[in-house]
Image (cartoon, grey):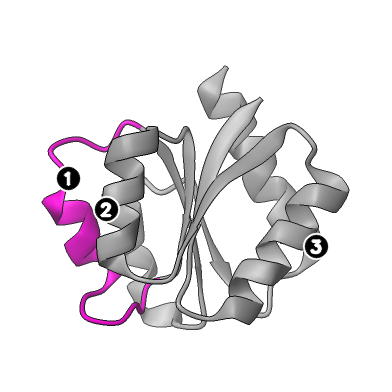
Amino acid sequence: MITSIIVDDEPRGIGTLKNLLQEYCPQVKVIAECSSAEDALEKIELLSPQLTFLDVSLPGKNSFELLEELSAIPFEIIFVTAHNDYALQAFQYSAVDYLMKPITFERFLQAVNKVEQAIQ
């Protein structure tokens, strides 16, 4: 079982990811949902997920600022965003994938498969 956290300021974004995971990726368990960088920071440090789905744009600070606050990044990252101009920056944080909203089923499954391979 891969533990994961979803970080997105839009409830619809969280819902979409949860539905895809429940329907097609039973090996991934969502252990927290966060709508802000502050909440995400707290949950990441408390729960130590293996995978984090990150939206780039969050209230107060973006995901890159959130990642800078962590002493280490011991989890896989899949960015899920509507912004196509942050891909290079995302891969500087060793992102497994960078998915554009609206998410396509095929790209989503490819990203989760990459995470599974990275964790193994």
Looking at this view, name the residue that lies furthest to the right: 23
Which residue carries the number 3 mark? 105
Position in image of residue 21 (x %, y %): 74, 50
The circle drawn on residue 41 is: 2
What residue is at 61 percent from the left and 37 percent from the top? 114
Marks 1 and 2 in Cβ contact (< 8 Å) = yes
Q: Secondary structure at mark 3?
A: helix
Is residue 84 visible in the rendered image? The answer is: yes
- The secondary structure that most of the magenta stretch takes on is loop
**Number of marks in picture:** 3
Which amino acid does the dot numbered 3 rest on?
Phe
What residue is at 70 percent from the left and 58 percent from the top? 18
What residue is at 52 percent from the left and 27 percent from the top? 118
What residue is at 27 percent from the left and 53 percent from the top? 41
Position in image of residue 65 (x %, y %): 18, 65
Which amino acid does the dot numbered 1 rest on?
Leu
Q: Secondary structure at mark 2?
A: helix
Closer to the camera: disc 2 or disc 3? 2
Q: Secondary structure at mark 1?
A: loop
N-terminal-most mark, 3 or 1: 1
Q: The N terminus appears in which quarter of the rendering?
A: top right
The front one of 18 and 81 is 18
Query: Horizontal placement of 102 versus 64: left or right?
Result: right
N-terminal-most mark, 1 or 2: 2
When asked about the image quadrant of residue 104, the answer is bottom right
Closer to the camera: disc 1 or disc 2? 2
Position in image of residue 107 (x %, y %): 71, 59
Which residue carries the number 1 mark? 70
The front one of 92 and 27 is 27
Q: Point out the stretch of residues depicted in magenta.
A: 56-74
Marks 2 and 3 in Cβ contact (< 8 Å) = no
